[in-house]
DNA sequence: ATATTTGCAAAGCCTTTGCAGGGGA
DNA sequence: TCCCCTGCAAAGGCTTTGCAAATAT
């Protein structure tokens, strides 16, 4: 979750820069998922919208999230501990830590994890994903 | 995929040892998923069953696969490149490599990948999952 | 005889899609 | 004007479940 929140104006600009029309719904969702939320699911975005936006359909929530993923303002996280997609405002390379007790996700900086693979020659690695799991104190 | 295939008798014994009734359907599915198949989906197991078993419902396929996972004769693999669960007869610790072209899965021995994490103290790691992705030649 | 398991169909869960109405450029 | 977006409801894909009939011990 980013510590700095974008203003509606900044969000509008970001959307336009990406070639996405800055509709009220999209700006609202951006305000939530880019600043306030922490790895929300579509359902959580919908719940937020129900409280903070006049009226927004679930389809619009999904469409908007998919659009934001397409233009790389957001990234999609699918992890085995949940059947729901989670959305991550961290679009840089990073790993994830799953708190086994709460299911909560934490972003892990790649610098904190060292991975080196020496596979048989037939494997050409293009990407490595690491998912950590355990307890989080505090 | 194991190179050694179990006989129906061995499968029957394995099921009984695990406290699972060795019904014809279960033995048949075991013969496929424990020996012949390579990371099959439930759908693929059903297709195999349709060709090689008098009659088996999809529910039985799912129930049986879940039972085998419960008794640890099989492990469940959920990866982000597919929305379908894949079943793995390798129940030992290992990682996976996804061939980006075919979607095919390869088991990777943990010895071939070195991972070391030095996270902040609040994180107590209980498990590390590594998913590699790239091209496979040959 | 009693407890499990099977098969079928229906339901469940998450996500996508079709289409008509509405709003922005 | 014209195209894109929204909302609604229906559909889609995968998996689970309820229940009655069949099977196992």
Image (spheres, coloured by chain):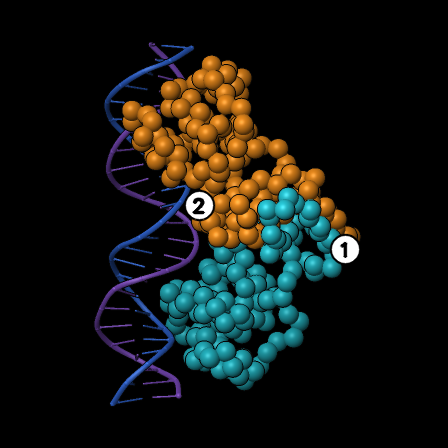
Chain colours: A orange, B cyan, C blue, D purple
Residue B61 at least partly seen: no
Residue B81: % across, % down: 55, 47
Residue A33: % across, % down: 46, 30
Return the residue nearer the eye: A3 or A16.
A3
| Left or right: B94 in relation to B40 | right
The residue beneath circle 1 is A120
The residue beneath circle 2 is A84
User: How far is mark 2 from mark 1, CA to CA?
Assistant: 34 Å
Crowding near pointer 2: few (<14 within 10 Å), some, many (20+)?
some
Residue A24: % across, % down: 38, 20
Residue B44: % across, % down: 49, 61
Q: Chain of mark 1?
A: A
Q: Residue at x 66, y 71 (%)?
A: B3
Q: Residue furthest front?
A: A138
Q: Residue at x 53, y 24 (%)?
A: A4
Mark sitting earlier along the chain (2/1):
2
Residue B28 at least partly seen: yes
Element at badge 2? loop
Return the residue nearer the eye: D9 or A113.
A113
Q: Residue at x 58, y 32 (%)?
A: A91
Element at badge 1? loop
Q: Is residue B66 above or below residue A5?
A: below
| Left or right: A32 in relation to B82 | left
């Amino acid at each position: 979750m980013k510590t700095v929140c974008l203003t509606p104006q900044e969000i509008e600009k970001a959307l336009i820069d990406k070639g996405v029309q800055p509709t009220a719904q999209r700006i609202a969702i951006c305000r939530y998922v880019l600043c306030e939320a922490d790895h929300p699911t579509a359902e959580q975005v919908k719940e937020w919208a129900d409280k903070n936006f006049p009226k927004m359909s679930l389809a619009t929530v999904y469409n908007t999230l998919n659009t934001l993923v397409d233009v790389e303002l957001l990234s999609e996280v699918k992890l085995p501990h949940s059947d729901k997609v989670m959305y991550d405002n961290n679009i840089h390379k990073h790993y994830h830590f799953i708190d086994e007790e709460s299911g909560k996700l934490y972003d892990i900086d790649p610098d904190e994890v060292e991975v080196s693979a020496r596979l048989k020659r037939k494997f050409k690695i293009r990407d490595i994903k690491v998912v950590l799991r355990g307890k989080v104190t505090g």
